[in-house]
Image: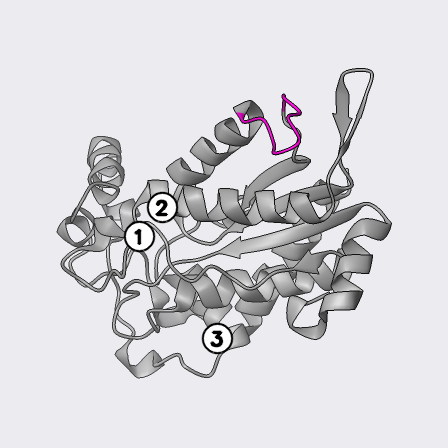
């Protein structure tokens, strides 16, 4: 269920009536070479969240379109600090909890709500890990200690596919071809090809790419991988695989 299709009375009734899972997609606004739009991470995670929500009957909230992207400086990165992303997500979860608070029974708290943060950008990982710890240790407004807000699961969608992930390379470009008409394939060019590097060079490149302004130092054109052979067919295959595996994980 997409939140854009829900109205206040229905939403309040729905969130209180039975156990509900709410998906909060998180993307970023950053460079993806010359051939993909700067909204790529948000576009992809929004589509995956929508498909997962329909498949599993989950509520899907609007995507947070900004993330922690300082590693792409001086290329486009409309960046928010990791502690701000953590705080935004914490506020969203606590406000949802206040609409459908848990109950305390024999010292234990049960909540009708569970949350899935579906991550679409690698740079958000630290903020999301910090959020999990904070929710575990923060008493809620009712005074209940010990993870009172409900079950939280954090998933980065690329962990649910077999193909090695990239940045604006074969995988991301294929995914975008499957969901968008904004891909400029004539401008697609090879970027950093890891297979051409030694294991030591690969390790150094991975480390540097996550540091401030580090990504363009290892991938000068902003591309990690080879997008030139990407296809819509491959993108649809990747999407189906990701959603299928996510659904299995969510329902286990």
Tell whether 246 sits left or right of 199. right
Q: Position of residue 123 (x, y in %)?
A: 35, 46
Q: Nearer the viewer, residue 71 or 147?
A: 147
Tell whether 154 sits left or right of 245. left
Outermost residue, front side: 142
Q: Which residues are magenta?
A: 138-146
Tell whether 11 sits left or right of 119. right
Q: Which mark is residue 84?
A: 2
Q: Nearer the viewer, residue 17 or 179?
A: 17
Mark 2 or 3, which is nearer the eye? Answer: 2
Binning the other alpha carbons within 10 Å of mark 3 as few (below 14), some (14 to 19) or many (20 upward) gives many
Quadrant of the drawing holding the N terminus: bottom right
Q: Is residue 165 above or below residue 135?
A: below
Q: Position of residue 111 (x, y in %)?
A: 75, 36
Tell whether 158 sits left or right of 57. left
Mark 1 or 3, which is nearer the eye? Answer: 1
List the residue tagged with mark 3. Answer: 177
């Amino acid at each position: 269920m997409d939140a854009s299709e829900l109205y206040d009375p229905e939403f309040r009734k729905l969130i209180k009536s039975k156990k509900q899972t709410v998906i909060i997609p998180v993307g970023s606004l950053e460079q993806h070479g010359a051939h993909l739009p700067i909204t790529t991470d948000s576009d992809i995670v929004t589509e995956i969240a929508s498909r997962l929500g329909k498949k599993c009957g989950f509520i899907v909230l609007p995507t947070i379109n900004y993330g922690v992207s300082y590693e792409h400086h001086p290329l486009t990165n409309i960046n928010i600090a990791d502690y701000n992303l953590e705080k935004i997500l914490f506020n969203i979860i606590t406000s949802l909890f206040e609409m459908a608070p848990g109950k305390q029974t024999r010292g234990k708290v049960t909540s009708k709500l569970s949350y899935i943060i579906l991550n679409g950008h690698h740079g958000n990982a630290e903020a999301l890990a910090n959020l999990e710890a904070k929710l575990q240790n923060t008493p809620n407004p009712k005074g209940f200690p010990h993870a009172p807000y409900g079950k939280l699961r954090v998933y980065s969608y690329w962990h649910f596919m077999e193909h090695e992930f990239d940045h604006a390379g074969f995988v991301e470009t294929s995914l975008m071809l499957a969901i968008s008409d904004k891909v400029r394939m004539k401008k697609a060019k090879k970027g950093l090809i890891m297979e051409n590097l030694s294991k030591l060079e690969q390790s150094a490149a991975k480390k540097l790419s996550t540091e401030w302004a580090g990504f363009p130092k290892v991938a000068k054109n902003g591309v990690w991988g080879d997008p030139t052979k990407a296809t819509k067919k491959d993108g649809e295959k990747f999407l189906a695989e990701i959603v299928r595996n996510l659904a299995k994980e969510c329902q286990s």
